[in-house]
Image (tube, helix red, strand yellow):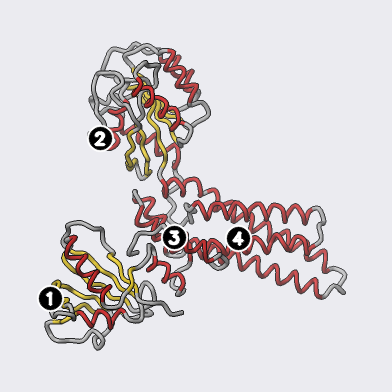
């Protein structure tokens, strides 16, 4: 498979010590050689692979030096894309890196599309689709745990398991075909039904194990949508600041200071939280505040976790009780704040309203109780479950949807065998399961979906 030569800036734009402009393709080395002048007058077309060279980029049109650079040269197939790759290391200024990019484009390369380097690695057979998707998960990882899951998928842990299951299904289908072709043996049908039931049950069991990790894996990949709710002036913004370890939200003694939803990512004991500080929920005549309160009610419906804040120094109000009703049925941690003040709250009533949910007492002014809260958040979703480094986690929404479909087909196949459904009908469910698992690793997937997936990648990756 031949492609044209592509180029892109592979480091973030802005001021920095170094920026990298990456080329990949059959003409990567000749293009770089046409604009590179080394101190030792070496030609890039003559130097060994996986070497780095110092010199200057020169515009062939006018002989003018453009940049002082280090050029890394790597010949395929021992590269990320399995093509010839050149990386030009230049100074990290915006003007500098753009001048290098424009010079390379002018001399024969094409600007890469988002994710095109990784797409070539996939199309050239270096990685499968699940490993390619893990590249972006690795870049976007917000905690060590999320990074470890992405690394495991990049190394092919999920791919190996999927391939093993597909092979089990393929061998079963082949055996069924042989038995159908030689029906003269009396025990063939009984043996085939028994084998189908055994193999389908095995595949179903493995799919269930994978899906058991999916909820946690998806949280690690996308973050846990966590909403801080409560009446005005109970300490919601102080809680946000304590978890972020920075003054992101304005804190005053004036009720209704927070008028909109404030969003921030935080890392709590390895759990990524997409933390939303909401306007205090209360009845108000202030038009702006009322809009904020309505937004607060809306985000509650999409939350994975609710941090419900109460004021230890106030008696429970009707508004507090209404908030408890609004979050009924959701994962909730109740935070009783301002314990540094004289207590007026009815603790028994709080426990009754909490209905078994964890209750944490804090004094955010004195930074007390935050560690206990972080531990409660971590334990609620990941208690003892992410310590095993050899487990395979599923975190990608596309993979999870395909696994759910495959599991349903296995359930149908098992039910069909038990009901005595003809073998060739049951075989259809197994074949479709084999195809769905192939979509995860890219062995049976439509080209338009591949283009859509890689379009979500960073430019230059």
Q: Which residue is mark 4?
A: 436
Q: Residue at x 63, y 58 (%)?
A: 203
Residue 228 seen in render: yes
Q: Residue at x 27, y 33 (%)?
A: 242
Residue 74 position, x and y percent, is: 30, 78
Q: Please rate how many residues cluster around mark 4, counting C-alpha atoms within 10 Å: few if below 14, some from 14 to 19, many from 20.
A: many
Q: Which residue is mark 1?
A: 65
Near-viewer residue (68 or 156): 68
Label 4 or label 1, whichever comes before in sequence order: 1
Q: Which residue is mark 2?
A: 248
Q: Secondary structure at mark 2?
A: loop
Residue 451 position, x and y percent, is: 47, 63
Q: CA distance from mark 3 to mark 4?
A: 17 Å
Are the residues at dot 2 and dot 4 in contact (C-beta closer than 8 Å)? no
Label 2 or label 1, whichever comes before in sequence order: 1
Q: Residue furthest front?
A: 61
Q: Secondary structure at mark 4?
A: helix
Q: Which residue is mark 3?
A: 133
The vertical placement of 93 against 142, above or below, is below
Left or right of residue 55: residue 323: right
């Amino acid at each position: 498979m031949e492609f044209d030569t592509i180029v892109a800036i592979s480091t973030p734009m802005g001021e920095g010590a170094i920026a990298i402009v990456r080329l990949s393709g059959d003409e990567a080395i000749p293009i770089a050689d046409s604009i590179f002048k080394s101190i030792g007058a070496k030609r890039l077309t003559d130097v060994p692979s996986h070497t780095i060279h110092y010199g200057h980029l020169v515009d062939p049109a006018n002989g003018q030096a453009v940049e002082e650079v280090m050029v890394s040269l790597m010949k395929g197939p021992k590269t990320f894309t399995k093509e010839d790759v050149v990386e030009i290391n230049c100074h990290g200024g915006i003007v500098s890196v753009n001048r290098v990019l424009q010079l390379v484009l002018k001399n024969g390369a094409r600007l890469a599309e988002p994710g095109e380097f990784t797409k070539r690695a996939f199309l050239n057979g270096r990685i499968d689709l699940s490993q390619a998707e893990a590249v972006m998960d690795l870049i976007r990882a917000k905690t060590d745990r999320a990074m470890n899951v992405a690394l495991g998928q990049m190394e092919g842990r999920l791919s190996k398991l999927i391939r093993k299951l597909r092979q089990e299904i393929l061998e079963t289908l082949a055996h069924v075909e042989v038995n159908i072709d030689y029906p003269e043996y009396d025990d063939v049908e009984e043996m085939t039904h028994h084998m189908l039931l055994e193999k389908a049950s095995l595949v179903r069991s493995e799919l269930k194990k994978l899906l058991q990790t999916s909820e946690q894996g998806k949280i690690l990949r996308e973050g846990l949508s966590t909403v801080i709710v409560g009446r005005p002036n109970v300490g919601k913004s102080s809680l946000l600041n304590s978890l972020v370890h920075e003054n992101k939200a304005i804190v005053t003694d004036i009720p209704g200071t927070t008028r909109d939803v404030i969003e921030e990512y935080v890392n709590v004991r390895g759990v990524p939280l997409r933390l939303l500080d909401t306007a205090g929920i209360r009845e108000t005549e202030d038009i702006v505040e009322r809009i904020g309160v309505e937004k607060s009610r809306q985000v509650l419906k999409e939350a994975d976790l609710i941090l419900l804040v109460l004021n230890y120094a106030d008696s429970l109000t009707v508004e507090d009780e209404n908030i408890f009703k609004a979050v009924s049925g959701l994962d909730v941690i109740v935070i009783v704040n301002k314990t540094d003040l004289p207590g007026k709250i009815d603790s028994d009533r709080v426990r009754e309203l909490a209905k078994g949910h964890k209750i944490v007492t804090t004094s955010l002014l004195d930074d007390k109780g935050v560690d206990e809260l972080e531990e409660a958040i971590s334990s609620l979703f990941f208690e003892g479950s992410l310590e095993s480094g050899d487990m395979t986690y599923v975190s990608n929404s596309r993979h999870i949807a395909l696994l759910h479909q495959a599991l349903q087909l296995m359930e149908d196949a098992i039910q069909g065998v038990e009901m005595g459904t003809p073998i060739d009908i049951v075989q259809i469910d197994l074949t479709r399961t084999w195809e769905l698992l192939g979509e995860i690793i890219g062995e049976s997937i439509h080209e338009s979906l591949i283009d859509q997936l890689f379009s979500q990648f960073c430019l230059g990756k």
